[in-house]
Image (cartoon, rainbow, N blue to C red):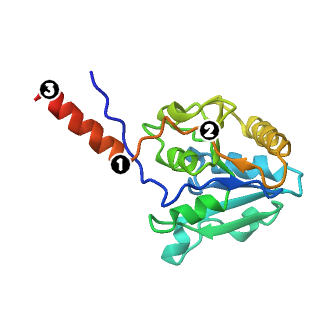
Amino acid sequence: LTVDRNGILMPKASIVKQFDGSITFGYVGGNTPIKGSDLVLKAFSNVNNSKAFLRIVDNMINLGHKSYPDHVVSSINNCTIVPGYNQNNIDDFFESIDVLLFPSRCKESFGLTVREAIARNVWVITTDSGGVTECIIEGENGNVIPFSSDSKKLENAINNVITHYETLKLGDDIDLPKDSIAYFNDQVDNLDGIYKLYL
């Protein structure tokens, strides 16, 4: 059996982040419990750190609607809702966050968003939900919490990452290990090698 790993869009440039003293968390899974939106909102509502921010992507904004009512996020400190991104501005979005929250309650076959994040030096906190964990190196580019995690376990993971980032000095480079990430050209080259080997 030969595996040709799925490729993702390569960043337009090598994005080496520099620590600016704040830690911005991002969530892109939609306002649905199956992706853990309720865990994110509840966990972050208990995070009391003036340097921690939450940025939630609401894809419905691009369609002229909102899936997050104002009262849902009004009680959460330092929380903003932003429109969905596309392949043209994906780098800009991931440059605006430091940590991706991915507390999925369903089994994921691949985890595109997780790989897009790590490729752009964004730390990932994810549940043990299948394919998303394949590119996580625990404690080096992300953290995996149990599949059955509640908001408290997610909150603990968030606070641990905040503590980790607060050990950095202003201006320190954030360049996460990402050798497990395959890009489109890697997938094509590997497939070409498979054809040449077996045909």
Q: Please report contact status of discs 1 and 2: CB closer than 8 Å, yes or no.
A: no
Residue at 54% from the left image edge and 39% from the top image edge: 178
Residue 10 x/y as whole percent: 44, 53
Pointer 2 local density, CA inside 10 Å: few below 14, some 14–19, many at least 20: many
Pointer 3 local density, CA inside 10 Å: few below 14, some 14–19, many at least 20: few
| In the displayed structure image, the side of residue 17 where residue 194 appears, left or right | left
Quote the CA–CA distance across marks 1 and 2. Answer: 24 Å
Mark 1 or mark 2, earlier in chain:
2
Mark 2 or mark 3, earlier in chain:
2
Q: Which mark is drawn over residue 198?
A: 3
Task: Determine the image quadrant of residue 144.
Answer: top right
On the rendered image, what quadrant is the N terminus found in? top left
Task: Determine the image quadrant of residue 187.
Answer: top left
Residue 15 x/y as whole percent: 59, 56
Q: Please report contact status of discs 1 and 3: CB closer than 8 Å, yes or no.
A: no
Give the camera-side residue of 136 and 32. 136
The amino acid marked with disc number 3 is: Tyr
Q: Which mark is drawn over residue 126?
A: 2
Element class at badge 3:
helix
According to the image, label 1 marks what residue? 184
